[in-house]
């Protein structure tokens, strides 16, 4: 608004702009953004035009629905455009709060911190940023400062973000290549307590950062690993950081995935993704009082770690609304029940299909792994794909799930024969039935040994060879 109360006369009309130029979406991305994204989408047939979304579904211009089993890589925990979250955002905008003055204390950050900490009674304080990688960066900085030590331990194949600090504890070379020098941190195998203790004996380790369930491949550590790792860390005066950016906020059937193991109390916990309600980016780092008091040890250090948009009113309102929905609709219990149902029904197919090797996970974080078949005909086709690029078969499954059955999924990581299911936590038996029926049809087609699915596989092979 201008001082005279008008809208400034700019004439901006978002609805008209989208109507006029929305059809240019792929061309605009190719010209001005990451040019490889539209190229990749065209190659695998994912270049759809979705008109609207609600809950666990998208709709295209023809009114066809698509089941979302990806949830924006876990962001849409309570589904898309949840009415409670929408209302909270309308309310906070209509309130015209004096937000982000930087020199006052607004109520919403304190209220959201209080609510988050109620799920982690052993922790005391919260820092709000804008993303998962920023939550991890905060934890790394706080751990180094609080302990006075430089080194962080992490797990092979871990994913903790893509900014420089979190990339230093990323266990996948494909993300790290070309971005050196990174911080001198050290990877250990997931579940290897001997390797952990060996590194801790050097006396320079600030913390061990770990996903309670690895997102890449959906791998869990052995039972008891987190608790025993915590004991080793405490003995060597190092900290345990739980990266719950994807696994937290109900994803695995408990509020946090580390809660599956009794006695585990991380010193720092990172959350993001589902806390946003899918609207406003938000990340949070929860920690013990003594850690925060070391970092913010005097008034001179009051802004030693901050974020320009951290604690903004819209993000805080979205987070509070999401947690309210989680409790009122018993979303965590639904994730546990529906996840058990989906995983059980998929696991029952392992003995039926020789290309299907494993189904694993917790709650609504499920990995479907494919592997080398036994029969000669299928083995030759499998070998053709593997020779071109590992991971092509999983992509061959993902594509017909979308094209023929209107279900959006994606592979769990590069060069992996694993599909990861991380749908909205609100799905139920109807969505389980739809996915299992479609997946069974795709597996039937794959094991028939011919048809459009393997024709598409040959297309992927040509593309993979051309990209070498």
Image: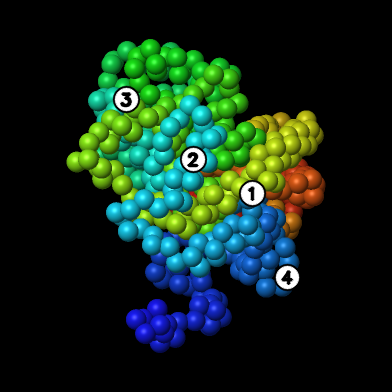
Marks 3 and 2 sit apart, C-alpha to C-alpha, by 27 Å
Labels 3, 2: front one? 2
Tell me what residue is drawn at x 29 percent, y 24 percent: 147
Look at discs 2 and 1 and give the one toward the viewer.
2
Q: CA distance from mark 3 to mark 4?
A: 54 Å
Q: Which comes sooner in the sequence, label 1 or label 4?
A: 4
Quarter the N terminus occupies = bottom left
* Residue 152 is at least partly visible in this image: no
Q: Is residue 294 left or right of residue 1?
A: left
- Residue at horizontal 51%, vertical 18%? 227
| Residue at 59 percent of width and 57 percent of height | 85
Label 1: how many residues lie within 10 Å, few (<14), some (14-19) or many (20+)? some
Q: Is residue 27 above or below residue 218?
A: below
Task: Give the residue number, with chain letter if any, for mark 3.
Answer: 206
Residue receiving disc 4: 63
Q: Is residue 130 left or right of residue 411?
A: left
Query: Measured from the top left, where is residue 153 in percent x and y?
Result: 37, 26
Sequence-wise, the earlier of marks 3 and 2 is 2
Disc with the residue nearer the chain's start (2 vs 1)? 2
* Foreground: disc 1 or disc 4: 1
User: Disc 2 marks which residue?
Assistant: 114
User: Callout 2: few (<14), some (14-19), or many (20+) C-alpha neighbours within 10 Å?
Assistant: some
* Badge 4: residue crowd in 10 Å (few <14, some 14–19, many ≥20): few
Circle 2 sits in a helix, a strand or a loop, which is it?
A: helix
- Location of residue 391 (image quadrant): top right
| Residue placed under numbered mark 1 in the picture | 325
Give residue 418's mark.
Answer: none
Question: Sequence-wise, which precedes: disc 1 or disc 3?
Answer: 3
Q: Secondary structure at mark 1?
A: helix
């Amino acid at each position: 608004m201008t001082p005279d109360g008008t809208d400034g006369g700019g004439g901006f009309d978002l609805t008209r702009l989208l109507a006029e130029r929305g059809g240019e979406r792929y061309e605009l991305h190719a010209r001005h953004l990451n040019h490889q994204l539209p190229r990749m989408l065209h190659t695998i047939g994912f270049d759809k035009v979705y008109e609207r979304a609600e809950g666990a579904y998208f709709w295209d211009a023809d009114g066809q629905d698509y089941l979302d089993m990806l949830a924006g890589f876990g962001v849409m925990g309570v589904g898309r455009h949840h009415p409670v979250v929408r209302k909270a955002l309308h309310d906070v905008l209509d309130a015209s709060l004096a937000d982000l003055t930087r020199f006052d204390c607004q109520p919403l950050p304190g209220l959201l911190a209080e609510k988050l900490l109620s799920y982690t009674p052993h922790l005391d304080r919260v820092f709000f940023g804008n993303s998962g990688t920023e939550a991890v960066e905060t934890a790394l900085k706080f751990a180094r400062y609080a302990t006075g030590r430089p080194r962080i331990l992490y797990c092979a194949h871990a994913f903790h973000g893509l900014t420089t600090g979190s990339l230093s504890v990323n266990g996948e070379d494909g993300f790290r290549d070309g971005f050196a020098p990174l911080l001198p941190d050290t990877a250990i195998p997931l579940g290897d307590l001997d390797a952990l203790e060996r590194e801790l004996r050097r006396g320079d380790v600030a913390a061990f950062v770990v996903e309670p369930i690895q997102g890449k491949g959906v791998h869990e550590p052995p039972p008891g690993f987190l608790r025993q790792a915590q004991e080793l860390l405490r003995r060597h005066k190092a900290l345990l950081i739980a990266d719950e950016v994807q696994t937290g906020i109900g994803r695995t059937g408990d509020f946090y995935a580390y809660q599956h193991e009794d006695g585990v109390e991380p010193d720092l916990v990172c959350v993001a993704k589902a806390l946003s309600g899918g609207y406003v980016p938000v990340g949070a780092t929860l920690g013990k009082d003594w850690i925060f008091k070391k970092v913010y040890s005097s008034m001179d250090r009051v802004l030693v770690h901050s974020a320009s948009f951290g604690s903004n009113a819209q993000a805080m309102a979205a987070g509070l609304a999401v947690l309210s929905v989680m409790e009122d609709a018993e979303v965590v219990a639904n994730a546990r029940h529906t996840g058990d149902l989906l995983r059980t029904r998929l696991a029952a197919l392992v003995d039926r299909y020789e290309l299907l090797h494993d189904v694993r996970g917790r709650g609504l974080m499920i990995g479907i792994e494919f592997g080398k078949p036994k029969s000669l005909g299928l083995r030759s086709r499998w070998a053709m794909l593997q020779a071109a690029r590992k991971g092509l078969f999983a992509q061959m499954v993902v594509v017909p799930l979308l094209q023929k059955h209107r279900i959006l999924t994606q592979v769990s990581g590069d060069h992996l024969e694993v599909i990861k299911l991380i749908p909205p936590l609100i799905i139920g038996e109807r969505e389980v039935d739809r996915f299992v029926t479609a997946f069974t049809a795709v597996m039937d087609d794959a094991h028939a040994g011919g048809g459009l699915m393997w024709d598409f596989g040959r297309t992927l092979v040509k593309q993979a060879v051309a990209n070498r």
